[in-house]
Image (spheres, coloured by chain):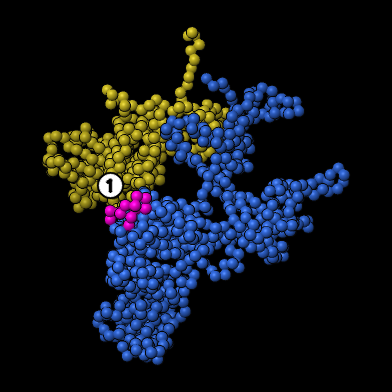
Chain colours: A blue, B yellow
Amino acid sequence: MATAKTKSQKKRADEAPEKAAIYVNGNLMGFHPDGASLAARLREKRRMNELNYEVNVFHNERTKEVFINSDGGRVRNPYVVVEAGKSRLTPEIMSKVESGALSWEHLVKMGVIEYLDAEEEENALIALKEEDITEAHTHFEVLPSTIFGVTSSVLPYPEHNSAPRITMACSMAKQSLGLYAVNFNHRFDTRSYIMYYPQRPIVSTDLYKSLRLDKKAAGQNFVVAITTYKGYNMGDGTVVNRNAIDRGLGRAMMLKTYSTEERLYPGGQKDKIEVPTPDVVGYRGEEAYKHLDDDGIVYPESQLSGKEVLVGKTSPPRFLEEISVFGVVEEKKRESSLSLKSGEKGCVDSVVVTEAPSGNRLVKIKVRSPKVPEVGDKFASRHGQKGVIGLLLKQEDMPFTKDGITPDLILNPHAIPSRMTAGHLLETLGGKAGALEGKLMDGTAFSGNTEEDYATVLKAKGFDEYGEEWLYDGITGQKMQVKLFMGPVYYQRLHHLVSNKMHVRSRGPVQLLTLQPTEGRAREGGLRFGEMERDCLIGYGASMLIRERLLEESDKTIQLVCNKCGMFAYHDYVKNKDMCPLCDSEDVSSIEMSYAFKLLLGEIRSMFIFPRIILKDKA
Amino acid sequence: MATKQSAKVNPYSAVGIVAAQSLGEPGTQMTMRTFHYAGVAEHVPTGLPRLIELVDAKKEPNKSLVEVYLKKEYKGKEAAAKALAKEMESVLLPEVATVQEDMASRRIIISLNENDAKALGVTIAMLKEGVKKTVGTNKVEHRGNKLKITLKDEKETPLKELRKLTGKLSKTLVKGIMGIKRSVVIKEKGEYFIRASGCNIKEIIPLPKVDPARIYTNSVMEIDKLFGIEAARNAVVREMVSVMESQGLSVDIRHIMLLADAMTADGKVKSIGRHGLSGEKAGVMGRAAFEETIKHLVNASIVAEDDNLVGVTENIIVGQTIPIGTGRIKLVMNAKKK
């Protein structure tokens, strides 16, 4: 509003060039000889509670405009008012607040606390802390950590991390598995994850507690040692303690809802949920239906895998059939059961039979599959330090301390310096101090516990004040050459699980039209050998390999071609002869080609161009 | 000798693909970098835009330029270079004179602006010379600072011609060499040379002070016109190498030479793309696979064109081994020998 010149703004510039224009909620109301003093007086009235606290005043000195806003939709932020270098929140007032005599509302009415909108903020100079106040300041932050947003306020020690890492940590926190809703047992989300044993972090923040995130945590406190170990934690890999995983570390389950409906078809036909009989078209064999109850729906708690059927269903045929010889319409039913996706495994969690909005019978089945962390699963701390499991190592092979502590996770030291996530290290210290003292630690930005706090605790408990410890190699039993930095860090399991992504194909389905392999994991597809990949093989001169990739492994067909006219021929099974449909010749050769080429020739013929295949013996 | 042998390419190697990849890969890096330089004014295009220009075989580069060196005897003489620069720089008629039409008496009157003329070193005689060339058979009279052009009688030249003539006069060259503008004298290695926009080297070379052996232009087409296809090939190579060097990329010169050879192989500079090299491929299917599929198929059907499956693409489409590398080797049995 302050930048775009409206019609009325132009008008006022012509009328009163020296005076300040006054706008109320964006409308020009009049002129005032001194905009600055007007704004100051209005603010004073607001602080004396003569003007509603929702009113904001912005004076633009350059354009000589005063904007007074009281309308909705402005984001506002509370600040403590500073006058002549002194906070209005005096010790007396503060003591009253502490005793409960004064509430927040009182402070706002007294003009101690004041809400600024984005525009009025331009006229203010806001100190981060009370100690920083100078003569020039007009306000200071109620809480320094409020300069962060909701998501980043939940991260510990953001002021010690580089900004890009905070951004990454925020976006990864949204991908973490935890307890997303307490009523998850009664919900039928299409897909959701629940962590088995979520923990609250040892080091958390004020906002974390205010948001009650400790009641629905999304992570666990891992004991993290920073070292390279066996070379399996190179480049953001991590070595994870297998026994810890067996004890439930990072364990989660995936809940997936499958649903099907008894649909109505034009002509009064209807789907039927039942156990299909062998005479149904597309019957999948007795094995596939073994988990079904008599009503055609699976038993809860039955273990399913592969493409086994969850709900048996039959549908009416797609096309109307001819009346059979006996004069009775023998309706052949079509199989249309709902089955588990290929490659998935799970247990039927719950079954619901209801009515769809259309009035049809609707069956929803929730399948639960445990997701034990495995090699390739993704984890991240709250500092943008993400990594995948590179090796699951038996506890006896992990390094151990004199007290017998083994790390849950071994982080590579190379992950630290270039990313400048000092917060991660500080959290390690905090986690260690907290665990030793049996206390939760505060990692709130600008006001949390300090390194010195942790150092004193660690020292008092007989540990190295910098969090380092002597460890012994789990395999050789030898003392390591240097002390390792070790302590509990809150780690999140992110929902990028190998078991949901892993995909291989050696043979598999092909597309109906082109006879080429299908695309995508859901269709068991192949990986495209594209144009640029093809160019590379040409560059090598590997012509046999190209032929294999593009023909043998793809859409090779054998077609009959007429030697006379070059048209595709056919085999007449009645006469047991190869025939040309055009020239009735029987002089036909069988040729190997790609099915795509056969289609191409067909398309060319469809544009009234006649392509002939003229054959020659290979010289 | 051993080194020379090892530098040789194996028979039936796909040198074209390798060259294309070797030029294309640094090309992707260039795109990313050139956008940072956007907004630099008055600059001869370098980097990817220039590369595209070269490969497209444009008639004239976006910013053509010439570099003219002086003969040995003028080496280090700034005055001579400056004089030559002034001599070369083109002056058009409207820069020094105003043109008036006189419809009634079928005449055009050109009056010289003395101040402008003096500054640019133009005399009335030079003006008359230039005007005579454009006017042709019409009569030109000279009176003081004015030139009077009288059209011939109605029958031979209708009045419409008067307008046409004034239009032509505004493009008349009075002094210098056509197309040469904005010249600068630059000192390098104790020698002065002239850099100017334009590429009319054909007319620069005969100038007495000019060293014809060291003249340079970035216009490949101009070089082709004047010196022939071999010179044009060298020009393409030189320009490409200089672009690559300016970007700090190292591409083996043989890749660039192959590209230049392909562009100039049949005597005229062809572009890479559907108007040039790819558009002249032997096989219908090869052309159809590139661009304008339907156009090629329809045209081929009209003349009943054959595709003998000689190219790589054609054979991939059909599903045969490609005639390159391994696929080119054939075993032939000698039936006579026992």
Q: How many marks?
A: 1
Q: Residue at x 40, y 45 (%)?
A: B160
- Looking at the picture, does residue A577 appear above or below residue A317? above
- Looking at the picture, does residue B67 appear above or below residue B35? above
Instruction: Specify whether residue A348 is in view.
Output: yes
Protein chain holding label 1 = B
Q: State the image coordinates of residue A399 (x, y, percent, origin top left).
A: 36, 55
- Looking at the picture, does residue A136 appear above or below residue A283? below
Q: State the image coordinates of residue A302 (x, y, percent, origin top left).
A: 64, 57
- Looking at the picture, does residue B167 appear above or below residue B57? below
As rendered, which of A562 and A176 lies closer to the eye? A176
Are there few (<14), some (14-19), or many (20+) residues within 10 Å of tag 1?
A: many
* Secondary element type, mark 1: helix
Q: Residue at x 87, y 46 (%)?
A: A327
Q: Main secondary structure of the magenta part?
A: loop
* Magenta residue check for B272: no
Q: Is residue B293 left or right of residue B203?
A: right
Q: State the image coordinates of residue A565 (x, y, percent, origin top left).
A: 64, 25
Q: State the image coordinates of residue A535 (x, y, percent, origin top left).
A: 45, 37
Q: Residue at x 34, y 34 (%)?
A: B255
As rendered, which of B246 and B43 lies closer to the eye? B246
Instruction: Specify whether residue A16 is in view.
Output: no
As rendered, which of A445 and B253 lies closer to the eye? A445
Q: Residue at x 51, y 67 (%)?
A: A179
To which residue does mark 1 refer? B93
Q: Image quadrant of residue A304?
A: bottom right
Q: Which amino acid is tagged 1?
A: Leu
Q: Is residue B315 left or right of residue A127?
A: right
Q: Quadrant of the N terminus of chain A?
A: bottom left
The stretch of residues the image draws in magenta is: A471-482
Q: Image quadrant of residue A614?
A: top right
Q: Image quadrant of residue A540?
A: top left
